Amino acid sequence: ARLLRTLACLFTVALKWLLIGRYRPGKHPFYSTFVWRDEIINSMQEVVAGGWLLTGALGSPIMNVYLRAMGAKVGRDAYVETLAITEYDQVDIGAAASINRGGCVETHLFQDRVMQIGPGKLGSRASIGSRSAVLLETEMGESSRLGMRSVLLRGESLPARTRWVGAPVVAE
């Protein structure tokens, strides 16, 4: 069973590199093959890798290894308790940063039938609260905190050592 779980993750990683290669900032029409390929990778992560191994590995070092293999930058001792990370090459999770249960690093948005991709960065020791989302083109400074069920909107930055909550966010 352990071998099958490992193979499911390796298959998902290999398929990402085969179908997508490296995610780059940019725009893609909704009905393009790129968006279809991206959806295949997202489905593989949720159903194959997630279903076979990752759901049981949330919050463990296995998640960091998996995300690095998918192309994300993940710092030492990061804590990732979610599968809601896509466009991996655009994700930068600093050392000892945490993405709590159900948190989301959403590095794409659809607007006017166009998929837009951009970076999302968490500084070292930054923390995304449970069920919160960080959108594309955002940056959380070192030791910044995003509270539960909050949304860091596109283009926003949180200064180091600050606490924020809400949708849109306001200082605590």
Image (cartoon, rainbow, N blue to C red):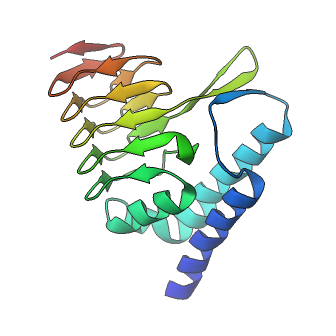
Q: Residue at (57%, 70%) from the top-left corner?
A: 9
Is the residue 97 above or below the residue 164 in the image? below
- Name the quadrant containing residue 78: bottom left
Residue 109: in sight, yes or no? yes
Give whichever of 4, 70 is nearer the camera: 70
Image spot of residue 124 (x, y percent) = 24, 42
Residue 1: in sight, yes or no? no
Q: Residue at (39%, 35%) from the top-left corner?
A: 121
Count the numbered circles shown. 0
Q: From the viewer's perspective, is 28 left or right of 145? A: right
- Name the quadrant containing residue 76: bottom left
Image spot of residue 117 (x, y percent) = 61, 30
Q: From the viewer's perspective, is 76 left or right of 30? A: left
Q: Residue at (26%, 29%) from the top-left corner?
A: 141
Q: Residue at (29%, 54%) from the top-left corner?
A: 79
Give whichever of 35, 101 is nearer the camera: 35
The quarter in which the C terminus is drawn is: top left
Give whichever of 117, 63 is nearer the camera: 117
Is the residue 15 above or below the residue 128 in the image? below
Is the residue 147 above or below the residue 156 in the image? below
Image spot of residue 137 (x, y percent) = 48, 24
Image spot of residue 166 (x, y percent) = 29, 18
